[in-house]
């Protein structure tokens, strides 16, 4: 029982990582209607920018803010320069460009900052909270920031004209143009926001997993899994999905005999696919009403 | 009137008195002749590389049958490649089966594996299918490593197999022989794919891709055909994997990571989604372009690769096959307007 | 009456294929003009070409200024509202969000709020369903929503693509009544594409007949309606 | 014509006769060697999941630049051709064949990774091209009877595992051992070494052995489990990133076992410092190379030499990474072999000289540790010494121990 509780808490802590990333995944899905494979590498790259600023002696929150701003601009620029020209190409061609971006960012980061791990500071206190040693202040802080982001996104999407325009542009670009929405810029904005959220996720995750060019490889997969389980259309679902994946993975790894510890990831993935079979649009996702 | 001419030309462009399909046939024969001659004139190492190109081409063609013809999406074909490779390696190493006989076994096992995977995949579409196949790709190396199967798979160590010598005392090097062997398999599989696409089954698969609801209404058993597409696709990729194991002489979990699946996808898109000859171009691309990128810059090799990839997509958004069609169409128009 | 929207020598393309072969069209300021023709004649294509949704050549003049080749959203910003074929509602958004989107380019919040009420006054059913996802509405209700959304733009020109499609006859009359009222009160110029020629001729004051991408006849609705060929081919008597 | 043939025959005879004293031998070359150059091939993961190791290839490259700048080896310049295999065995095979058949190198040196080296082992031995000083501690690369063209270099993982076993049996005979290992050949070799070393007691002493995958984001879950299983000896078989995670997580949850950290990850600069020096206190490990980030060696002459080399030839190189120390030393070992080979730069002689290292001392090896090899001993380094971290630097203790696997 004690082990169960401990693993549950550890699962929540890791789940926080996935939730953070899942949120960025949902963000990009909302604006481009598919998934960006280079998302993790973008987050990793942003985190390196923050690391570099810190190394130059910037204060933490200054570097944090600058990184978020730079990432936002970077996201917009990537959309405008890389994806606008191939707007009409098939989806698979877009995916190949994502793969290209993935290799470029990974390679450039490794070339510039080396592949040796770097520690990245946490803005939260390092002593254990409430005498609880199983979940650190940083874990809690990260979960808190995820929730704050979630609320901000909710407000943006549900209660502002800009958010409404973004949702419209993603859901039905042609109709959105017909009401005068500049769809191209909405997509670029979506990229910017996704990059900014990714940057925050990266800066929250790096203190836990250490900063190195390949740090996002596994996390992106789990984040995607979380987003899909929760439903790609629902930010709340994505965050819950992220936690669910973290908890399931830890419990499966610990309590399923023989194969559990070796196939932790596989079991988590099988469960996710099972969820999708029963509920193809995710636990909290809405099925699009399709007109025939 | 002008419109009617346009349509007529798009339907059957003629260049130099030959229709597009006629050019294709001519080109096929030409490529085959060159393919037969090449190993006699180049180094063994190049022969080996070209063999790998053909193997990748078969794997990419497999993926293409699924994505290009049937419209299903897979990021997990490294798994079927791995199953094919391990089938061959285990049969050769543990049971002493001759290498040539392992290919059909690998193909059948992958057909079954693909069909079975295709069943649950039926309920998933687009991104969700992508995730499920992605999961398959990620899980594959773990399953191969699993200590439960270590007796057969060799666990993390993998299996080393012996490279076959040419039969009947043919005066060929091992590399040359494997090249011709692979070429023969490739020709058979490409021809079979071409027949499949133009058959009733092929039309059904394409109908499902273009309009699943209409296909259903026409009485096509979409579930069966979609699973079948998965199976056949896996068969192709599995046979490629089997050949790969023989040529590389080694299988290990690290050989079949998610990056292999990504490479297949890249090869398919670069060659042209839905194009049979495009698979060869795709195979050559994933074989040679990374080496080229490495020559440009060692530290930034993958950045260079990424840039090349982006440029390719910009120039040929629908892959090499689409690009050729476009150019052929243009040429045809210029030729006919000069006539 | 000057031409509010004038089209000269319009050619339009789907990919490599040409669908319109040079056609002229005038839309009178404050008038209602109908575009008649059989299925596939190119009626919808004309509307799509005017608001820049497909590639076209030739001149398109709004108030005498060329608007050919500019982006859809910029055409819309000049006051051209297009109710597309198939309605183009945002099915996952609520009714009220759909209406709000119609006024996306307007800055006068208070006026927008008043206009929403005006649309609700026209279509009380929409008010009842304001919090529902648009996808849950019936075809007729969605059509009302599409018209309402177009009105939210306070357009100067409205392009309507088969607004009667999928509507019960009683509803059709209602929608056209409202359109006519708006046309009069706001002096909106309307270009109407209709399969139902009888309806269109009753509603409009001018009409064009289009066949395989070309204008084959134009004139007042009275003239067109009186034409023997038109009566036989399109009016069915 | 006749005279020339006779001359050639005489030369060949002379070559055979003088084989035992290479410096006097006639010039004799295999592909890849000439009067002016020696071509050395290498395969490294510059991309992909193991790209951190790419630093090794880059450092070796820099070191050979230094050798060349200082006049080369017996007047010959080293041409170092290094390719990327992205840690994928099929690519390793392709690159090895490219090096042998296209670039025609004299030998392949320091190809990295167990799977990749296994993949090319048969090929290299078939071609009779040296696969020298492979960059892996797997035990299968020191088997001269079956694979006379393949040789390891670093102490093998199993030997190291046995050293820890010896320590545990000696100091904590009643300990409950918890193991965290990377789920691949490297992790399993360590595991085997430890279990062999513990012998019959292994089953009763080991309370948990938990694997992790390279793609796993964290090893937090495993650490929590190890603690709750009541382990009081922690055998940490992880690569640097996961080692740092494990050390930090253990400290975070207040788990204070006897912590045995594998040599792969005992760099102060790139593991212990990121993990937290306080948290790393009292960790035990083994060493054979000096760690540049350990202040113990601050004034060491050899370390200063290394630093001068880094500053001049590899200024962008990450000096906190132990890979640069490692690569520098292994490159020196190759230079030693090539020097010994003199003018007889044949593949056979290269292997022969590699198997003829006698008490070679290299500056960056810990005091007392020497290179030794023989026709039946393809493990040049077999000695290690245990060390304890005091929160700032490593302190060596106990005797220089040698593994029991090599020399067979």
Image (tube, coloured by chain):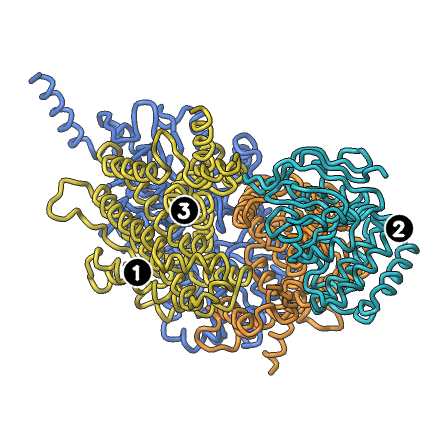
Chain colours: A orange, B yellow, C cyan, D blue
Q: Quadrant of residue A280?
A: bottom right
Indicate the position of residue A165 as horizontal and vertical percent values.
76, 53
Q: Is residue D137 left or right of residue A27?
A: left
From this view, report whether residue A131 is shown above or below residue B133. below
- Please give the name of the residue rendered at 41% of the width and 52% of the height, measured from the top-left corner: B64
Q: How far apart are marks 1 and 2 (CA)?
A: 71 Å
| Image depth: mark 1 or mark 2 in front | 2
Q: Are marks 3 and 2 in contact (CB under 8 Å)?
A: no
From this view, report whether residue C40 is shown above or below residue B136. above
Question: Same chain for the residues at labels 3 and 2, yes or no?
Answer: no
Q: Residue B107 carries which label?
A: 1
Q: How many labels does the image show?
A: 3
- Chain for disc number 3: B
- Chain for disc number 2: C
Give the labeled residue for mark 2.
C186
Q: Nearer the viewer, residue B26 or D86?
A: B26
Ranked by sequence position, the earlier of labels 1 and 3 is 1
What secondary structure is found at the residue carrying circle 3? Answer: loop
Q: Residue B275 carries which label?
A: 3
Q: Distance between the residues labelled 3 and 2?
A: 56 Å
From this view, report whether residue D86 is shown above or below residue B329. below
What secondary structure is found at the residue carrying circle 1? Answer: helix
- Please give the name of the residue rendered at 21% of the width and 44% of the height, measured from the top-left corner: B177
């Amino acid at each position: 029982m004690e082990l169960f509780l401990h693993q549950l808490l550890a699962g929540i802590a890791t789940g926080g990582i996935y939730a953070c990333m899942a949120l960025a995944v949902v963000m990009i899905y909302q604006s481009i209607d598919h998934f960006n494979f280079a998302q993790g590498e973008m987050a990793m790259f942003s985190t390196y920018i923050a690391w570099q600023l810190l190394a130059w002696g910037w204060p933490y929150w200054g570097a944090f803010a600058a990184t978020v701003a730079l990432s936002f601009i970077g996201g917009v620029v990537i959309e405008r320069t890389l994806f606008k020209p191939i707007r009409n190409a098939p989806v698979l061609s877009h995916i190949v460009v994502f793969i290209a971006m993935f290799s470029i960012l990974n390679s450039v980061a490794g070339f510039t900052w080396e592949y040796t791990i770097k520690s990245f500071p946490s803005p939260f206190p390092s002593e254990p909270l409430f005498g609880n040693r199983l979940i650190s202040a940083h874990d809690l802080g990260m979960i808190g920031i995820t929730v704050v982001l979630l609320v901000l996104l909710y407000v943006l999407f549900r209660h502002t004209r800009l958010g409404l325009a973004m949702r419209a542009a993603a859901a039905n670009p042609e109709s959105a143009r017909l009401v005068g929405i500049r769809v191209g810029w909405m997509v670029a904005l979506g990229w910017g926001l996704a990059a900014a959220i990714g940057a925050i996720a990266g800066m929250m995750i790096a203190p836990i997993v250490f900063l190195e060019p390949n740090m996002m490889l596994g996390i992106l997969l789990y984040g995607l899994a979380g987003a899909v389980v929760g439903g790609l259309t629902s930010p709340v679902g994505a965050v819950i999905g992220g936690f669910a994946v973290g908890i399931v993975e830890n419990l499966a790894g610990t309590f399923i005999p023989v194969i559990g510890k070796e196939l932790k990831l596989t079991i988590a993935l099988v469960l996710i696919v099972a969820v999708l079979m029963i509920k193809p649009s995710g636990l909290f996702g809405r099925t699009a009403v399709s007109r025939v | 009137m002008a419109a009617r001419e346009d349509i007529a030309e798009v339907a059957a462009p003629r260049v130099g008195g030959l229709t597009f399909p006629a050019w294709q046939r001519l080109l096929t024969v030409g490529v085959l002749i060159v393919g037969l001659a090449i190993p006699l004139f180049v180094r063994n190492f190049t022969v080996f590389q070209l063999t790998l190109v053909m193997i990748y081409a078969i794997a990419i063609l497999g993926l293409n049958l699924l994505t290009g013809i049937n419209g299903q999406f897979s990021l997990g074909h490294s798994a079927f490649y791995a199953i094919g490779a391990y089938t061959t390696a285990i049969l050769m190493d543990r049971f002493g089966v001759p290498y040539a006989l392992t290919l059909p076994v690998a193909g059948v096992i992958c057909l079954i594996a693909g069909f079975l995977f295709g069943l649950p995949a039926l309920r998933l579409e687009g991104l969700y299918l992508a995730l499920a196949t992605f999961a398959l790709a990620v899980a594959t190396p773990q399953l191969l490593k699993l200590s439960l199967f270590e007796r057969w798979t060799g666990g993390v160590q993998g299996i080393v197999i012996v490279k076959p010598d040419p039969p009947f005392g043919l005066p060929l090097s091992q590399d040359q022989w494997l090249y011709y062997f692979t070429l023969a398999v490739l020709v058979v599989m490409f021809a079979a794919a071409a027949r499949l696409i133009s058959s009733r089954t092929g039309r059904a698969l394409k109908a499902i891709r273009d309009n699943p609801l209409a296909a259903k209404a026409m009485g096509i058993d979409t579930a069966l055909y979609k699973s079948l597409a998965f199976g056949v696709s896996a068969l192709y990729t599995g046979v490629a994997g089997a050949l790969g194991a023989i040529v590389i002489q080694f299988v290990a979990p690290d050989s079949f990571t998610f990056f292999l699946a990504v490479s297949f996808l890249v090869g398919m898109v670069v060659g042209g989604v839905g194009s049979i000859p495009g698979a060869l171009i795709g195979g050559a691309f994933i074989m040679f372009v990374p080496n080229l990128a490495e020559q440009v810059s060692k530290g930034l090799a993958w950045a260079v690769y990424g840039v090349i990839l982006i440029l390719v997509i910009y120039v040929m958004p629908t892959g090499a096959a689409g690009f050729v069609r476009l150019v052929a169409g243009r040429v045809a128009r210029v030729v006919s307007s000069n006539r | 009456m000057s031409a509010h929207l004038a089209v000269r020598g319009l050619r339009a393309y789907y990919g490599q294929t040409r669908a319109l072969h040079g056609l002229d069209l005038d839309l009178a300021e404050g008038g209602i003009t109908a575009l008649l023709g059989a299925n596939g004649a190119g009626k919808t294509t004309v509307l799509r070409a005017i608001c820049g949704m497909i590639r076209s050549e030739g001149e398109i003049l709004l108030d005498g200024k060329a608007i050919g080749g500019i982006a859809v959203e910029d055409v819309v910003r000049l006051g051209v509202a297009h109710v597309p074929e198939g309605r183009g509602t945002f099915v996952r958004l609520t009714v009220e969000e759909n209406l709000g989107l119609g006024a996306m380019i307007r800055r006068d919040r208070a006026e927008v709020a008043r206009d929403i009420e005006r649309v609700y006054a026209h279509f009380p059913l929409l008010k009842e369903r304001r919090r529902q996802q648009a996808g849950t509405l019936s075809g007729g209700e969605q059509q009302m929503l599409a018209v309402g959304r177009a009105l939210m733009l306070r357009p100067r020109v409205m392009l309507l693509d088969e607004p009667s499609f999928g509507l019960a006859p009683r509803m059709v009359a209602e929608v056209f009544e409202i359109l006519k009222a708006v046309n009069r009160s706001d002096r909106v110029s309307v270009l109407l594409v209709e399969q139902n020629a009888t309806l269109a001729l009753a509603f409009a004051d001018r009409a064009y007949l289009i066949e395989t991408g070309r204008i084959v006849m134009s004139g007042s609705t009275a003239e067109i309606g009186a034409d023997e060929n038109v009566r036989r081919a399109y009016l069915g008597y | 014509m006749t005279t020339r043939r006779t001359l050639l025959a005489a030369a060949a005879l002379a070559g055979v006769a003088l084989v035992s004293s290479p410096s006097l031998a006639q010039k004799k070359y295999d592909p890849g060697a000439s009067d002016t150059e020696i071509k050395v091939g290498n395969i490294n993961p510059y991309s992909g999941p193991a790209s951190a190791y790419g630093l090794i290839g880059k450092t070796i490259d820099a070191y050979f630049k230094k050798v060349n700048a200082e006049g080369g080896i017996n007047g010959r310049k080293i041409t170092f051709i290094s390719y990327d295999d992205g840690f994928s065995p099929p690519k390793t095979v392709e690159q090895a064949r490219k090096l042998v058949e296209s670039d025609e190198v004299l030998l392949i040196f320091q190809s990295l990774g167990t799977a990749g080296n296994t993949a090319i082992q048969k090929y290299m031995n078939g071609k009779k091209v040296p696969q020298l000083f492979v960059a892996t501690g797997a035990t299968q690369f020191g088997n001269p009877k079956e694979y006379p063209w393949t040789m390891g270099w670093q102490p093998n993982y199993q030997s190291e595992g046995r050293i820890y076993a010896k320590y545990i049996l000696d100091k904590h005979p009643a300990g409950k051992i918890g193991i965290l290992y990377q789920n691949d050949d490297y992790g399993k070799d360590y595991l085997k070494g430890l279990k062999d070393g513990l012998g019959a007691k292994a089953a009763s002493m080991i309370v948990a052995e938990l694997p992790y995958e390279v793609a796993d984001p964290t090893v937090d879950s495993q650490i929590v489990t190890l603690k709750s299983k009541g382990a009081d000896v922690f055998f940490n078989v992880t690569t640097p990133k996961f080692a740092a995670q494990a050390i930090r997580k253990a400290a975070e949850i207040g788990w204070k076992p006897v912590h045995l950290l594998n040599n792969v990850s005992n760099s102060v600069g790139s593991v212990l410092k990121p993990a937290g020096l306080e948290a790393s206190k009292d960790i035990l490990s083994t060493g054979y190379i000096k760690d540049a980030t350990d202040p113990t060696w601050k004034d060491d002459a050899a370390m200063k030499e290394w630093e001068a080399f880094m500053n001049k030839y590899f200024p962008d190189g990450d000096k906190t990474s132990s890979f640069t120390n490692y690569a520098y030393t292994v490159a020196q070992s190759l230079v030693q072999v090539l020097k010994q080979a003199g003018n007889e730069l044949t593949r056979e002689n290269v292997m022969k000289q590699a198997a003829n290292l006698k008490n070679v001392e290299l500056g960056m090896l810990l005091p007392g540790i020497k290179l030794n090899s023989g026709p039946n001993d393809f493990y040049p380094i077999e000695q290690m010494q245990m060390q304890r971290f005091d929160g700032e630097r490593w302190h060596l203790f106990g005797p220089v121990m040698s593994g029991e696997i090599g020399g067979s």
